[in-house]
Amino acid sequence: KQKYDMFGDENGGGGNPFSGGVDMDDIFSSFFGGRQQRRQRVRKGSDIRITLKLNIDDIFKGVYKKIKYKRNENCVECKSTGGKTISCKQCDGKGHINHIQNTPIGRVQNTIQCHSCGGRGSIIIDPCKVCGGKSYISKEETLEFNIPSGLSDGETLILRGKGNSIPNGINGDLNVQIIEIPHEKFKRSGLDIHQRVYLSYKELVLGTPKEIETLDGKIRIKIKPGTEVGHILRVSKKG
């Protein structure tokens, strides 16, 4: 549960197969002229995406990381209003307007964001001197967290609420994409680790014990007599 709360899953969590898809309230609202009561939507700030380069040792064992990145935070000086405001006349302070369109099946009503105020319901007439009317300031954030072992190259960790802030809403997320740095000895294929072992002709013909390195320390393997060039020797539980 702790890992889920912190990172979520690769698809953003939630468990809803229709997440980000069709909203049934929108459909009912379209056909019945808005008489179906709409859910109160929670505004969410934008997500931030960064890349984090890790070597194969860090991915194998897991690692504790400290990162710095920039995010937008609501302005405290103006309380995220952007300054002195007046109610938007276009939407009457609601932040949205009803849009009616004639279609072959009749009149369809949709609720859309007000373009005049950008959905805020108010218009700035005297901008805040700290944020310049943006309602947010850019700040450098320092974040420390544990990265679990066994991640794949290109996999994304989702850190809930660590993205950009938004007035009257919740923070977006921080998406950390893992980039694996190529290793000079090891090459990964899924959960398996590959490495090349160079042998002399005599060792191939007669066989020999051989000490090799793994991500979990050195081990000894047995090269059988008559081993051919290109033969793959599998060692279990060392990936």
Image: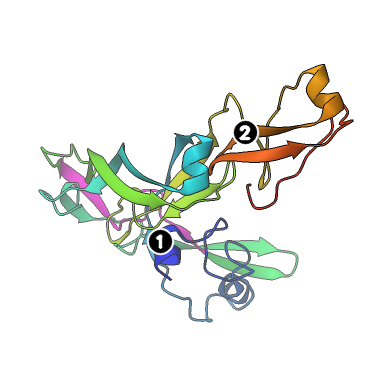
Where is residue 27 shown, x and y percent of the image? 63, 72
Question: For the point 39% across and 66% down, which residue is it?
Answer: 42
Res 207 → quadrant: top right
Q: Pick whichever, 68 or 230, lies toward us.
A: 230
Answer left or right for 161 relative to 192. Answer: left
Q: How is the image coloured?
A: rainbow
Q: CA distance from mark 1 to mark 2?
A: 67 Å
Whether residue 96 is visible, yes or no, is: yes
Tell me the amino acid under the disc marked 2.
Ile
Answer left or right for 178 relative to 104. Answer: left
For disc 1, the marked residue is: 96
Badge 1 vs badge 2, beta-carbon distance below 8 Å: no
Does residue 7 show up magenta in the picture? no
Graded by Cα atoms within 10 Å as few (under 14), some (14 to 19) or many (20 or more), the crowding at tag 1 reads many
Where is residue 184 shown, x and y percent of the image? 58, 23
Where is residue 168 shown, x and y percent of the image? 28, 61
Disc 1 versus disc 2: nearer the observer: 2
Disc on the earlier residue, 1 or 2: 1
Is disc 1 placed on a helix, strand or loop?
A: strand
